[in-house]
Image (cartoon, rainbow, N blue to C red):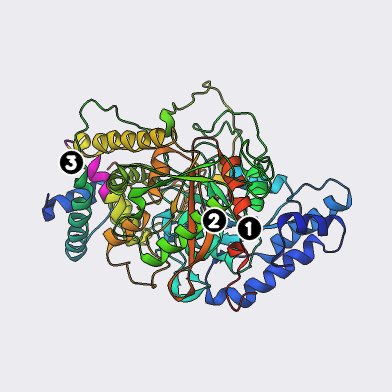
């Protein structure tokens, strides 16, 4: 597999990471070498093998849908980049 | 004092031969004097540490001390600690001060341990050399031009250079065992789910597992007794009765006799681990260690893990896939870095993440985003999960024939700083022997077993079946009673 440069840029946008053209080219070369390694998987026939999503096929434990935490918005918003009146500020989304 | 075991330190504290404040001051002094050349710590805060030490002294005086009361511990900066910068080695979190404690930190605090500082690491634990940190690379005390291993390199080095008696780490693909091996200390990755992931900054959630670093197996057991346990806040934390991980340190195996403490133990040596790619100096140190296990009474048999070669390819699908999802939370809105200039919301996300993450983290997010993207899921993610099962089955088959698997941790001794940073594939192949235990979720450890070229340490890898940590620690303890590799101190740090 060889990732074309426009694919690299598309992935970067999906991941919300800005890349310059030069960065995209450097990343393209790295990704192509990494995918050459990853594609060694294709040498193995895995038909009939159940995928294993978790160590020991653990299932994620569910809990009752109930309130467990008190209001900690001040503590949590103290570490936010921009807050006003208890709200997180971001650039205008709707004109 | 810097070479004392946890038991000796606890006895000295109980007998008031030393105070927790003195012990903490001693560590702080060593960090101040020696860490400039090593960069093992990202944050130290003597005021905060000494406050905890004074509380520990009061607790000792009141007769309420436990085995870790007053013991300084260095936490990998992946564990958030209330009031401490918790950076994960990233610019993204460089100014993040945690509003809460990780479960592991909480456990140590409840035990009366003293937080000595937060240790340096590969950014978001993505790396095998501790060179990708925003705060600069960690250096190996055995040779400061060599890497410490990663990602928990700062914790390994803190213990190796006797800056801290013990430390914590995390292991997603080898990040405890690999730096333990390259820095010449002991490190244990428990069975997946043993140590809570709450407050442990997520990398690849189906693989991430916390564990201890120490200078001996006996000390690791004391630490794991504190770290392990059910926590409802981690959805994959195991609901199991507490166990004493030190219980098999001195308990003889059923087939043991005087002089043969490992009698009856079947050690499996995977032929795949001794093939091309393993450096001869590492192979010979590991082979000598296996001979030592034999001398102690163990029988050694060849076993096969035929899918070993597929562990790196499948891991580099699964771990980046989970990472791309986990790291989507860093958006510059709720915490962490935000780009100073941007046009609109999407531009703010893109610039924040471009500036806040380093090259390796971005690379892995891009791999993960791609393998999870529309049309590629089956070819990569599902395929990798099927191979994960084949790898786990290899171990199930092997453990029908043996009680423990022994082999190398790393293909080479510590490599030169900068040697592999520009070649991600070479860097990834360092993890060839460690990744499989994460994919399968098995407990595994590294203990010092000799020295390779240029006097650099070599680790012996012991992998056990699920929930056999106590057995692994017992084997390692018997090995350490018969050898002194774990007691060696790098020159200049004694």
Residue on which the image places disc 3: A42
Q: Position of residue B173 (x, y in %)?
A: 40, 49
Other-residue count near label 2 (Cα within 10 Å), few / some / many at <14 / 14–19 / ≥20: some
Pointers 1 and 2 in contact (CB under 8 A)?
A: yes
Label 3: chain? A
* Numbered range of the magenta stretch: B367-375
- Foreground residue among A68 and A41: A41
Q: Which badge, 1 or 2, is on the more N-terminal residue?
A: 2
Q: Is residue A40 above or below residue B182?
A: above
Q: Which mark is residue B44?
A: none
Name the residue at 53% across, 33% down: B237
Q: Quadrant of residue B248?
A: top right
Left or right of residue A44: residue B262: right
**Between marks 3 and 2 in the image, the one whose residue lies nearer the viewer:** 2
Give the residue displayed 26% in from the left and 50% down from the top. B366
Q: Position of residue B51 (x, y in %)?
A: 75, 59
The magenta stretch spans residue B372: yes
Judged left or right of residue B404, residue B224 is right
Question: Quick one: B142 or B133, which is closer to the camera?
Answer: B142
Q: Quadrant of the C terminus of chain A?
A: top left
* A52 over B110 or under it: above or below: above
Residue on which the image places disc 1 = B482
Q: CA distance from mark 1 to mark 3?
A: 46 Å
What element does badge 1 sit on?
A: helix
What residue is shown with label 2? B292
Q: Residue at x 44, y 35 (%)?
A: B401
């Amino acid at each position: 597999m060889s990732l074309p440069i426009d694919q690299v840029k598309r992935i970067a946008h999906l991941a919300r990471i800005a890349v310059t053209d030069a960065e995209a080219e450097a990343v393209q070369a790295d990704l192509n070498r990494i995918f050459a390694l990853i594609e060694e998987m294709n040498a193995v026939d895995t038909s009939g093998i159940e995928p294993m999503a978790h160590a020991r096929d653990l299932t994620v434990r569910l809990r009752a849908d109930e309130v467990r935490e008190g209001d900690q918005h001040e503590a949590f918003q103290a570490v936010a980049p921009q807050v006003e009146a208890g709200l997180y500020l971001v650039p205008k989304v709707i004109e | 004092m810097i070479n004392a075991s946890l038991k000796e330190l606890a006895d000295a504290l109980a007998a008031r031969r030393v105070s927790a404040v003195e012990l903490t001051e001693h560590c702080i002094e060593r960090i101040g004097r020696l860490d400039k050349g090593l960069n093992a710590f990202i944050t130290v805060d003597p005021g905060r540490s000494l406050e905890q030490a004074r509380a520990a002294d009061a607790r000792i005086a009141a007769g309420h001390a436990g085995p870790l009361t007053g013991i300084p511990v260095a936490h990998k900066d992946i564990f958030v600690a209330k009031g401490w910068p918790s950076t994960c080695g990233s610019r993204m979190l460089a100014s993040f001060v945690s509003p809460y404690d990780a479960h592991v930190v909480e456990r140590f605090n409840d035990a009366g341990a003293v937080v000595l500082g937060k240790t340096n690491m590969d950014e978001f634990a993505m790396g095998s050399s501790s060179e990708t940190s925003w705060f600069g690379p960690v250096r190996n005390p055995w040779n400061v031009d060599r890497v410490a291993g990663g990602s928990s390199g700062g914790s390994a080095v803190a213990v190796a250079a006797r800056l801290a008696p013990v430390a914590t780490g995390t292991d997603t693909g080898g990040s405890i065992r690999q730096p333990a091996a390259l820095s010449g200390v002991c490190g244990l990755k428990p069975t997946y789910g043993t140590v809570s992931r709450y407050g442990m900054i997520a990398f690849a959630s189906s693989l991430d597992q916390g564990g201890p670093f120490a200078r001996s197996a006996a000390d690791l057991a004391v630490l794991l007794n504190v770290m392990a346990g059910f926590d409802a806040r981690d959805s994959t934390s195991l609901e199991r009765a507490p166990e004493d991980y030190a219980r098999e340190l001195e308990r003889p195996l059923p087939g043991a006799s005087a002089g043969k403490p490992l009698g009856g133990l079947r050690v499996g040596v995977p032929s795949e681990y001794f093939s091309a790619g393993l450096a001869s100096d590492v192979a010979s140190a590991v082979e000598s260690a296996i001979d030592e296990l034999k001398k102690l009474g163990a029988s050694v048999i060849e076993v096969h893990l035929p899918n070993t070669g597929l562990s790196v390819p499948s891991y580099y699908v699964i771990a980046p896939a989970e990472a791309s999802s986990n790291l989507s939370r860093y958006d510059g809105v709720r915490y962490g870095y935000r780009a100073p200039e941007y046009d609109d919301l999407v531009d703010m996300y893109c610039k924040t993440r471009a500036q806040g993450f380093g090259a390796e983290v971005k690379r892995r997010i891009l791999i993960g985003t791609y393998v999870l993207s529309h049309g590629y899921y089956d070819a990569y993610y599902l395929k990798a999960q099927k191979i994960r099962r084949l790898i786990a089955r290899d171990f199930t088959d092997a453990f029908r024939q043996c009680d423990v698997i022994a082999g190398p941790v790393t293909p080479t001794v510590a490599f030169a700083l900068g040697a592999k940073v520009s070649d991600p594939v070479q860097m990834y192949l360092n993890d060839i022997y460690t990744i499989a235990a994460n994919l399968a979720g098995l407990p595994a450890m590294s203990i010092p077993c000799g020295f390779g070229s240029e006097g650099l340490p070599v680790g012996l890898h012991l992998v056990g079946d699920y929930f056999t940590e106590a057995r692994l620690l017992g084997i390692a303890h018997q090995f350490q009673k018969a050898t002194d590799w774990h007691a060696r101190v790098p020159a200049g740090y004694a």
